């Protein structure tokens, strides 16, 4: 088992902040959980706890960005994208201010805290905002690379991270191109597009299917916006059956984004794995993934159902 | 600048506010007119903004948190020679840089994009914190509405500004007592705002927002207040300067017709 993406974020951000005096970090009383506390320790003068006030945190981040700083503003995904949505829309994205909203504890994998803390709408909420970019890394290496990348773009973005430890997909020294999708297994007939911790589930499903002589293509879509439309269109043209996997409502997230591309370039039958427009519940995260149909078994079933 | 000169500038700014709103046949005259004296003193005696430095941020800045007072801000920038005066006649018209609520990327001297109430004070304090980090002594001002203070984010920001000791931040509260639905007291009762800010640890100065000596003195006091942010609660008259607009909530966001416009201009030109 590798590290949680939030841990990778905390480590990378502390390192970046120590190197770059323009980076400032804000949190809303969850620094220990989001791991921005590591930056607080490394560069206390550029760490600002805004208290339990996410809207205000985003407003402050906008003011700091308007003054030439590169703010990273973190909380749980539910609160930084939900509570502060309109601040992100009007004070960050509309004026193109260089704010990085980084949400941790996204999806249902937050587990025992239950529905009030399970953001299954955040990808939709952020990708619908003009000018916002949305990144969903799947493991520690990809998270560190995303954080490095967004720190240098000069544009606002949302990075979606998880609470729990996840298997490593990538080697630590992997070079990423976040303008492109990442094909992890080149197969045929069926393509599985996955994002976040569903990438690991898709890879597990792929291995099971391979044992049965089915070899699906597996794609990691880390950049949900901007979306590599060309790369996705190519996969759609060369595969008959499409499965999308996300730890998010099936409405408005990766599945919707892929369907948008399909409708434009190559209509395909798409099975969406995700929360079927319903809430989950409290529980251990692996058990929740299983109960709500987000595990490799569900993906295997979906592939075979075509 | 003497008070007579300030009065002339404020009067000309008021005339331009009327022209902008009349020409666009939309916009917010009431809350623009109420804060005209406040911003006149601020821009002509305190803020170090001019045509040469307006595009940058190496100067004092203002967040127009009550973004619907955009006709006022644009008229002030024109009065300072930063915005070409003829551009005011493009206000709210398609293709214009003078958006209904201000866009910081379109107009030099607009320091934050605002319009959604309650968001400006947090951004202003973010700028104040940034100035401290950068080690400069520029001041940050935020113009708030009293109705706007019904937004919870104002108080989140008030808490943060005090916590971070943002004494380079001065909020100016245009306390005109009216909002779209009527008297603030009847709508939801945000007062007493001075006591609320004081309870949040701010230095509070209560003035008549149309008295130049009081405005000047308050802005000086704010500048000299160390350790805590200052709010100037300025009692104002919504629609100030145009008899039929004064103290009328109905003129919050309405344009005058031709007859009303000429009467308003005649009144202001007679002052």
Image (cartoon, rainbow, N blue to C red):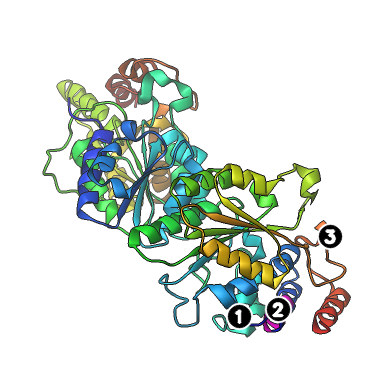
Q: Position of residue A174 (x, y in %)?
A: 13, 44
Quadrant where the image shows the N terminus of chain B: bottom right
Residue B262 appears left or right of A53 = right
Q: CA distance from mark 1 to mark 2?
A: 9 Å
Q: Which mark is residue A193?
A: none
Q: Mark 1 sits on what residue?
A: B78
Give the letter of the chain under mark 1.
Answer: B
Give the letter of the chain under mark 3.
Answer: B
Q: Residue at x 48, y 25 (%)?
A: A116
Do tags 3 and 2 sit on the same chain? yes
Which of pointers 1 and 2 lies earlier in the amino acid sequence? 2
Which of pointers 3 and 2 lies earlier in the amino acid sequence? 2
Secondary structure, magenta segment, majority class: helix
Give the letter of the chain under mark 2.
Answer: B
Pointers 1 and 2 in contact (CB under 8 A)? Answer: yes
Q: Taking B34 as reference, is A195 above or below it?
A: above
User: Depth check: A113 or A40 in front?
Assistant: A40
Q: Mark 3 sits on what residue?
A: B248
Q: CA distance from mark 1 to mark 3?
A: 27 Å
Dot 2 alpha-carbon crowd within 10 angstroms: few under 14, some 14 to 19, many 20 or more: many
Q: Mark 2 sits on what residue?
A: B16
């Amino acid at each position: 088992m590798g590290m949680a993406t939030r841990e990778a974020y905390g480590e990378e951000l502390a390192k970046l902040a120590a190197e770059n005096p323009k980076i400032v970090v804000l949190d809303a009383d969850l620094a220990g959980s989001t791991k921005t506390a590591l930056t607080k320790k490394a560069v206390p003068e550029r760490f600002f706890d805004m208290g339990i006030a996410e809207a205000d945190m985003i407003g402050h981040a906008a003011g700091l960005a308007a003054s030439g700083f590169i703010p990273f503003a973190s909380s749980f995904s539910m609160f930084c994208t939900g509570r502060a949505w309109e601040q992100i829309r009007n004070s960050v994205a509309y004026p193109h201010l260089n704010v990085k909203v980084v949400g941790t504890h996204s999806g249902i994998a937050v587990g025992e805290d239950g529905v009030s803390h399970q953001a299954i709408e955040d990808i939709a909420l952020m990708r619908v905002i003009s000018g916002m970019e949305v990144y969903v890394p799947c493991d520690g290496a990809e998270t560190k690379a995303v954080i490095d990348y967004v720190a240098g773009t000069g544009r606002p973005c949302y990075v979606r991270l998880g609470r729990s430890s996840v298997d490593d997909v990538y080697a630590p020294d992997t070079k990423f191109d976040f303008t492109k999708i990442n094909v992890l297994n080149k197969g045929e007939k069926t393509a599985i597009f996955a994002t976040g911790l569903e990438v690991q589930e898709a890879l597990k499903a792929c291995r099971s299917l391979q044992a049965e002589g089915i070899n699906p293509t597996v794609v990691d879509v880390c950049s949900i916006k901007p979306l590599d439309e060309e790369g996705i269109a190519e996969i759609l043209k060369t595969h008959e059956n499409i499965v999308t996997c996300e730890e998010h409502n099936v409405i408005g997230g990766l599945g919707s984004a892929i369907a948008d591309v399909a409708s434009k370039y190559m209509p395909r039958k798409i099975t969406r794995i995700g929360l079927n427009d319903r809430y989950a519940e409290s529980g251990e995260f692996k058990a929740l993934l299983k109960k709500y149909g987000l595990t490799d078994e569900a993906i295997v079933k979906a592939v075979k159902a075509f | 600048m003497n008070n007579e000169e300030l009065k002339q500038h404020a009067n000309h700014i008021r005339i331009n506010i009327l022209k902008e709103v009349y020409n666009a046949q939309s916009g917010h005259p009431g809350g623009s007119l109420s804060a005209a004296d406040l911003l006149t003193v601020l821009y002509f005696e305190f803020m170090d903004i001019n045509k040469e430095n307006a595009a940058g941020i190496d100067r004092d800045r203002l967040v127009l948190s009550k973004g619907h007072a955009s006709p006022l801000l644009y008229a002030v920038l024109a009065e300072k020679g930063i915005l070409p005066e003829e551009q005011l006649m493009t206000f709210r018209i398609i293709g214009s840089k003078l958006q209904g609520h201000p866009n910081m990327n379109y107009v030099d001297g607009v320091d934050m994009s605002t319009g959604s109430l309650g968001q400006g004070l947090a951004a202003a304090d973010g700028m104040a914190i940034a100035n401290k980090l950068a080690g400069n002594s520029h001041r940050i001002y935020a113009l708030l509405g009293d109705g706007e203070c019904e937004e919870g984010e104002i108080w989140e920001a008030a808490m943060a500004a005090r916590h971070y000791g943002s004494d380079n931040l001065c909020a100016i509260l245009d306390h005109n007592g009216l909002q779209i639905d009527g008297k603030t007291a009847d709508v939801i009762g945000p007062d007493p705002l001075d006591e609320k800010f004081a309870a949040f640890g701010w230095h509070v100065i209560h003035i008549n927002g149309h008295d130049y000596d009081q405005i000047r003195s308050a802005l000086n006091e704010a500048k000299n207040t160390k350790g805590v942010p200052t709010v100037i609660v300025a009692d104002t008259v919504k629609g100030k300067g145009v008899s039929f607009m004064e103290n009328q909530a109905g003129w919050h966001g309405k344009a005058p017709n031709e007859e009303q416009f000429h009467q308003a201009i005649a009144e202001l030109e007679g002052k």
